[in-house]
């Protein structure tokens, strides 16, 4: 197996007529399955046909897809407009050090044995090619991953070598997200956390049973979940001054949704644990879309609205203080597709027990549709010198008052609500 991989790698590196920018272009195109910063998707005609109304499309995705391309020396390179912490947006390059892979993940186009064009960079080539794009101001950050070659430990070493060339030889100070490989060593994690702004390892599924159906060579606890536990232990037990820019990086993971018939309840039960027990900053959800030539090519695609509901529910747990038990599921363990999770909660818990805006604490206010963290903060600040008596008072401070109206009282009175036409 190692000999065959060595042959593939040599072939990849010496592909005739393929210079560094050509290889980078191909490498970036291979990273479309990886989420970072922005969970939206292009609104292709296929996606438009999956049950979205025009209003839902505008509300959930806006009028324009938020990715773009940069044109350099005759090459067209896709760039992601990533949304980072604090809502900062940067043009981000998502690239693979190698598209060679020895793993057999059933949904992946460049799994072992597939008829897929391969490219491989040396650490120095990848670092210097990206840095040229950075100097040209075409991008402001890089998300660096790789196929697994000669095991996760060896692959991780190559990723780390690339990051160290960027940081220490080239003096790169920009955003760096490093992918963590399956089976990485703890010392490698420490090394990665001293170089990166964010580290991530994809769990892909909520447990070993579901993971084995899409990635039979991966071990859920030993190779994947253990790394997230170690990352949290390093952050808690070591001096943050050892990290990049004197702080430890955030961590994230990603799930492939709908490829193994897992339920939303399975996924979110784990997500809650990851947020509260290992300090995970973000979970990404990728609606399964079958790739021709893979073992799952005939598996039906996942409705992207299911992906959107999972994001909404994860934000309720992470940012709004919701307990897992407060999320509504169908009998089969799925989030209702036709209703966002916060509204589903309010219809059950608040319709007959409305929240008094002038007395409720932050935790209760956040359970009202139309009131987010900023809106709750504005209410708490404003009511120190003002009593809220009508919806216009809430509207003035940025609260979506009409959305909140059925579930609140203002100075003891239910506000008038406009009846919807049938």
Image (tube, rainbow, N blue to C red):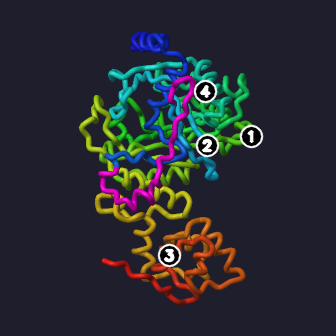
Pointer 3 or 2: first along the chain: 2
CA distance for labels 3 and 4: 47 Å
**Is 104 placed left or right of 285 in the picture?**
left
Pointer 1 or 4: first along the chain: 4
Q: Is mark 1 on a helix, strand or loop?
A: helix
Q: What element carries label 4?
A: helix
Asked if labels 2 and 4 touch by Cβ distance under 8 angstroms, the answer is: no
CA distance for labels 3 and 2: 33 Å
CA distance for labels 4 and 2: 15 Å
Q: Name the residue under label 4.
A: 130
CA distance for labels 1 and 3: 42 Å
Looking at the rendered image, the disc whose residue lies closer to the viewer, 3 or 4, is 4
Q: Mark 3 points at which residue?
A: 404
* Residue range corresponding to the magenta coloring: 48-76
User: Which circle marks residue 262 in the picture?
Assistant: none
CA distance for labels 1 and 4: 24 Å
Asked if labels 4 and 1 touch by Cβ distance under 8 angstroms, the answer is: no
User: Which circle marks residue 90 in the picture?
Assistant: 2
Looking at the rendered image, the disc whose residue lies closer to the viewer, 1 or 3, is 3
Q: Residues within 10 Å of mark 3 (few under 14, many from 20)?
A: many
Q: Name the residue under label 1.
A: 246
**Is 42 placed left or right of 179 in the picture?**
left
**Is 313 placed left or right of 109 in the picture?**
right
Magenta stretch holds residue 139: no
CA distance for labels 1 and 2: 22 Å
Q: What element carries label 3?
A: helix
> What x and y, as percent, mark residue 146?
50, 27
């Amino acid at each position: 197996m190692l000999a065959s991989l060595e042959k593939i790698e040599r072939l990849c590196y010496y592909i005739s007529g393929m210079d560094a920018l050509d290889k980078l272009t191909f490498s970036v195109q291979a990273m479309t399955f990886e989420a970072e910063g922005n969970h939206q998707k292009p609104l292709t005609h296929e996606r438009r046909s999956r049950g979205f109304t025009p209003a839902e499309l505008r509300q959930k995705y806006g009028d324009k897809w938020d990715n773009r391309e940069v044109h350099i020396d005759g090459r067209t390179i896709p760039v992601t407009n990533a949304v980072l912490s604090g809502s900062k947006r940067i043009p981000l390059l998502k690239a693979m050090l190698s598209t060679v892979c020895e793993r057999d993940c059933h949904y992946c186009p460049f799994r072992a044995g597939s008829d897929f064009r391969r490219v491989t960079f040396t650490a120095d080539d990848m670092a210097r090619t990206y840095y040229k794009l950075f100097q040209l101001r075409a991008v402001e950050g890089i998300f660096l991953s790789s196929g697994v070659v000669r095991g996760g430990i060896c692959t991780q070493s190559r990723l780390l070598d690339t990051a160290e060339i960027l940081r220490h030889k080239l003096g790169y100070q920009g955003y760096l997200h490093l992918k963590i490989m399956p089976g990485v060593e703890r010392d490698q994690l420490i090394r990665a956390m001293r170089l990166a702004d964010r580290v991530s390892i994809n769990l892909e599924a909520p447990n070993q049973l579901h993971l084995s159906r899409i990635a039979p060579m991966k071990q859920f606890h030993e190779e994947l979940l253990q790394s997230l536990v170690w990352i949290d232990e390093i952050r808690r037990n070591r001096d943050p001054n050892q990290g990049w820019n004197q702080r430890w990086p955030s961590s994230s993971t990603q799930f492939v949704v709908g490829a193994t018939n897992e339920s939303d309840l399975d996924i979110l039960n784990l997500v809650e644990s990851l947020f509260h027990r290992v300090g995970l900053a973000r979970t990404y959800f990728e609606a399964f879309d079958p790739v021709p030539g893979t073992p799952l090519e005939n598996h039906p695609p996942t409705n992207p609205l299911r992906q959107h509901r999972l994001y909404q529910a994860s934000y309720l747990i992470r940012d709004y203080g919701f307990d897992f038990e407060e999320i509504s599921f169908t009998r089969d363990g799925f989030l209702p597709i036709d209703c966002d999770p916060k509204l589903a909660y309010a219809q059950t818990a608040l319709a007959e027990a409305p929240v008094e805006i002038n007395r409720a604490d932050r935790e209760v206010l956040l359970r009202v549709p139309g009131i987010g963290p900023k809106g709750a903060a504005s209410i708490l600040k404003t009511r120190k010198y003002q009593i809220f008596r009508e919806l216009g008072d809430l509207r003035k401070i940025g609260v979506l008052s009409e959305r909140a109206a059925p579930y609140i009282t203002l100075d003891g009175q239910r506000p008038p609500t406009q009846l919807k036409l049938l």
